[in-house]
Structures are given as C-alpha cells and as structure tokens.
Amino acid sequence: MEGITLELVGLQLFTGLALGAVYVLLAVGLSLIFGMLTIVNFAHGAFFMVGAYAGYALYQLEPNFWLCLVLVPLLVGALGMAVERVLVRPLYGRGIDYPLLLTFGLAYVMVELVRIAFGKQGLPVDTPELLQGSADILIGQFPLYRLFVIGVTALVLFGLWLFIEKTSFGLIVRAGARDPQIVRILGVDIAKVWLIVFGLGTGIAGLAGFLSAPMQGISPEMGGPVLTVAFVVTVVGGMGSLVGAIVAGVLVGVVESLAVLFFPEAAKVSMFVIMAVVLLVRPQGLFGRPGLMS
C-alpha cells in the first residue's frame, strides 16, 4: 500500500502497545475480581472514569503528577472497597445476576455524580511537562508519554505477579479463586480477602483511567466504551485468567492499531473479530478453564 513504510508500521505497533497497556490494566482488574469473587463488575468502566476525574481534581489542588499517580489508585481502590463492603457483600450467594445488576446500576449513578460535579462536557488533560515530547526508538520518534504508559503497566504487572505468586496473601488469593470453601475451612477470613481483591481490581482500573487521560481527555461517558473493550479482552484471554488478560489486551491493542493503518473501516470491529475467532477455537478463551461459568 502506498505511503506505508516499515518504520510507519513499527511506530503503529508501538502505538498499539501503548493502547494495549491501558486495555491490559482494565482487563487485569476485571479478571482479578471475577477470578476471586465470580462477580461480573459492570461498574468497572465507571471506576476507570472516576480514576481519570480523581486525577484531574487532585492535580487542580496540587499540580504534582507523580503524587497523583500514587494517590489515584489508592483513592479509587478505597472507593471500590467501600462499594464491596456496603453494596456487593450482601448479595453474595444469591447468584451471579444480583451483583451484575447492582454494578450495572451503580455505573449510571457514578456517571451522573461526575456530571453534577464536573459538568457534562469533556475536559482536556495536559501531558506532564517532564513527559512531553518524543524519544528515539530506532525506528523513529515516538511520544514519550506513551512509552511511560507502557513502562508503568509493565511495573504494575510485575508488582502484581510478585504479590500473587510470592506472598502468603497471594497464595490465599490463588487458593480462594479455585475453592473458597476450602479456604474458609482453613480458618481464613475470606470476606477480608474479597474486600482487598475488589479494592485492588478497582484501584488498577482507576490507575488506567488516570494514565489514559492525557491521551484522550476525560468525559463522564469515557467508561462505557472501555468497559466493552475490557469485557472483550477478558473473554478472549479467558474469564478470571490474569495471564490471558495480559496477552489478550496486548493482542487487541496491537491489532486495533494496525487495523487503523491498513483497514481504517475495520478498526473498531477488529476486537470483535478476534473474539469470534478465539471463541470458535477455544470457547473458554485463550487461557481460561473449561466450565468456569457453569
């Protein structure tokens, strides 16, 4: 195709990695909650949106990007823990539909509250001064902030892997995801584990929203489209699989980005094509366990 060079394809590939990094953070948080609590969290996109607005509000009070980077996931995670404790916990044991409907309604409430507080119009978010400009990645100049997003995502995933694989609490999380009843029998307070996991998953979603804000701006409705992407990535990777969420997030981001270059008309539907192909070959997803939803 005319005008398309190897360097352009390489730069678009890196763009896909940056886009996929946001998708990975979203899907990891969603998979973490589903894998442990078996809850389909329809408010996950709203937590993503709240993270973006929380970062915007904090930056207005204290224009320190690095402080906001630390505080936003903590604040959104704390909000998630409050939601789990007050709203979600009473619905455990009543079937998967009750938490699903609750979080679906909660998402609308959160969007309306943000509209009341910040208005209905979208807001631009400036890239931090230190991360403005571009860097040479051998195949060309690439925005420095997008490289930063990829790096932060890699650090978060590494930290999450250490937490789950190398700590005693992570062992409880892995065991609880497979058989919560056995964990209870061993004397573990499973309710406390669920609380922390829900907070961790929503905190990661809030971080994804904060990181994406300089790339796309913020609006009260920004959580809707990314929720669709998060569910597609989670289904492609396998419900409850963190490895699957990582692989599928990168795959969807790269394919969508390359589709913009080669087939612009198909860019928005490319992720659904991936999902259809994967489900035809492996109905449980790339890394999912058969019968997980049964």
Image (cartoon, rainbow, N blue to C red):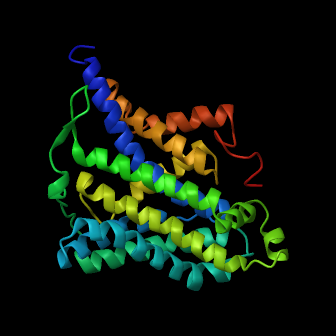
Whether residue 97 can be seen here: yes
Q: Is residue 98 above or below residue 277?
A: below
Instruction: Judge left or right: residue 66 versus residue 73.
Output: left
Towards the viewer: 280 or 202:
202
Whether residue 228 can be seen here: no
Which quarter of the figure is the C terminus placed in? bottom right
Q: Position of residue 108 (x, y in %)?
A: 43, 72
Residue at 23% x, 58% y is 217
Residue at 41% x, 69% y is 73
Q: Position of residue 119 (x, y in %)?
A: 22, 74
Q: Position of residue 271 (x, y in %)?
A: 47, 38
Count of numbered marks:
0
Instruction: Judge left or right: residue 278 versus residue 291.
Output: left
Instruction: Judge left or right: residue 199 versus residue 166.
Output: left
Towards the viewer: 259 or 97:
259
Residue at 71% x, 76% y is 190
Name which quarter of the figure residue 124 lies in: bottom left
The residue furthest top is 2
The residue furthest bottom is 86
Q: Position of residue 84 (x, y in %)?
A: 57, 78
Towards the viewer: 65 or 253:
65
Which quarter of the figure is the N terminus placed in? top left
Q: Is residue 77 above or below residue 156?
A: below
Residue at 66% x, 33% y is 280
